[in-house]
Image (cartoon, grey):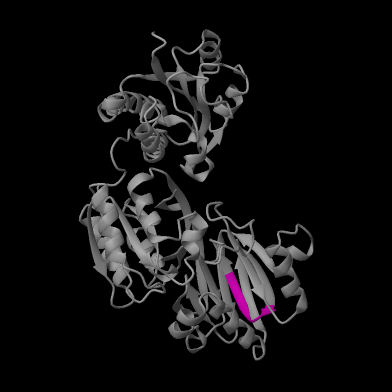
Amino acid sequence: MSDNTINLILAVFEGKDSAEAVIEKLPKRNRNTVSAVVMKKDEQEHVSFKDMGRTPTRGTVNGIILGGVVAVLTGGTGLALGAIGGVIGHHSASKKQAVNVMPDQLNRVAGSLGPNSSAIIAVVKGEPKAETVTIIKEAGGALFEAVVPQDASRELDEQADEAYATLLAALAERTGGEAKLGVPYQKIHVIINPVSGKDQPILNALNDVFHQYGITWDISITKKYGDAAKFARQAAEAGCDLVAGYGGDGTQHEVANGLIGTGVMMGVLPGGTGNGFGTELGIPDELRAAVELLCKSYNKRKIDIVKLDGWSEDYFVQRLFTGIEPEEQTSREDKNKYGTLAYLGRDIKRLREVKDIPYTLKIDGETIEVMGHKCYVVNSAKAGTGLSISETFKVDDGYLDVFMLSRDKKSTNAALNRFFNLENEKAGMFYWRGQKIEIDAEPDQPVWTDGEYTGRTPVSMEVVPGGLTVAVP
């Protein structure tokens, strides 16, 4: 192989931690190595990257512009993967192109990697060293290569597509993934809640971004509760690849209920007062950036959902709580005026008047009698402010976190200890974990799921691990 070539190398392994273990055995210094990164995909198909810090200084590799390559990549993914799709030659146009091309190339590789797999991705000048190849193969890795001449910068699109078509198909076959080339979702339907908390030109952003990527798209506009779930089911039946909800957590709740069981991907667009669900998943809080994510990211995350037993709304995805009557709920006027602080103001006002009542909880068959005024069952812990009820609560751990608020000061102290992630005895008070939860109270209490009034106690529920798949960064 001539030294006038750029070689993109993927070494693929079974097991999400295998690639990182192997790369530590490889030579630390190689003047021909432009960049190296470890990519992981776990069993839930969540993708992560780790820059291995092997990118040389500017000018070390003749013919490749490396200045700022690592810095321009988003999400902390330091990968000079653009050597095959933009960082070639000495032209400033190529350098500008790299900013746009590299995340796309990165997402294509991530989309083609199967679950519970990992890979070493490297850009080198010329052939990989024999020692490197031996170490990879002895560890059970499969080696794939794609070559682009350094002087091919005028034909980048054609060269890159041809190289990736072969490379990604082999990668997907090896790991059980699906080879990805163009945009991740060709047909997207957006459900818009027009009374959500943000005032912005929604259609302009959708049209501008989707047109840029050549995506077929359509919208539905909700008028009443239940419309979003209905529209989501209809869009799935019509063959859409992804259905996204523009609105707050209540809108996302409905879209999720409409898509569960269809196999269609869910997208999240920020349009509410808090957008806690999107915050939990790392969705950008700026609309155009969130729309672009649907056009570029092949990453997806399987999250837990919660099945309600015998209720009209079958599932919730974030949290359930009891104890606030519908007439006490925060008004749209206050949400528009005070944002997320409106919820805090409501709760402070209620504390002056609220009284504890007896609750009966059954958690995985164990009965618990406790006094309190508000019971939470949490699947997703983040609020729209970015703060979390507790960093130990996870949306994909297969468990539900249950806690009770009461006028007992120990309850408040316990909640504060969980909020600050203090691992002590106090943090465990008024708190339980389980997969099957039953709640009853005397007198009966109102029940809210994902911010929507759903009914009254008693209520029973069970977690469904990995029951919903969402497009994520």
The answer to whether 459 appears left or right of 89 in the picture is right
Above or below: residue 22 compared with residue 454:
above
Q: How many marks?
A: 0
The part of the chain drawn in magenta is 371-376
Give how far across and how far down residue 151 sits, in percent: 32, 19
Give how far across and how far down residue 363 sits, in percent: 61, 64
Which residue lies most toward the right here?
A: 425
Give how far across and how far down residue 357 sits, in percent: 65, 84
Question: In the rendered structure, does residue 403 fall within the stretch colored magenta?
Answer: no
Of residues 169 and 452, the one nearer the viewer is 169
Of residues 80 and 178, the one nearer the viewer is 80
The answer to whether 406 appears left or right of 172 in the picture is right
Any part of residue 468 in sight: yes
Give how far across and how far down residue 192 sits, in percent: 31, 68
Of residues 119 and 311, the one nearer the viewer is 119
Any part of residue 232 in sight: no
Above or below: residue 346 compared with residue 104:
below
The answer to whether 290 appears left or right of 318 in the picture is left
Q: Quadrant of residue 372?
A: bottom right
Above or below: residue 470 compared with residue 41:
below
Above or below: residue 166 compared with residue 247:
above
Residue found 54% across the figure and 80% down from its top: 342
Main secondary-structure element of the magenta-colored stretch: strand
Residue found 40% across the figure and 54% down from its top: 289
Residue found 38% across the figure and 45% down from its top: 297
Quarter of the image that includes the N terminus: top left
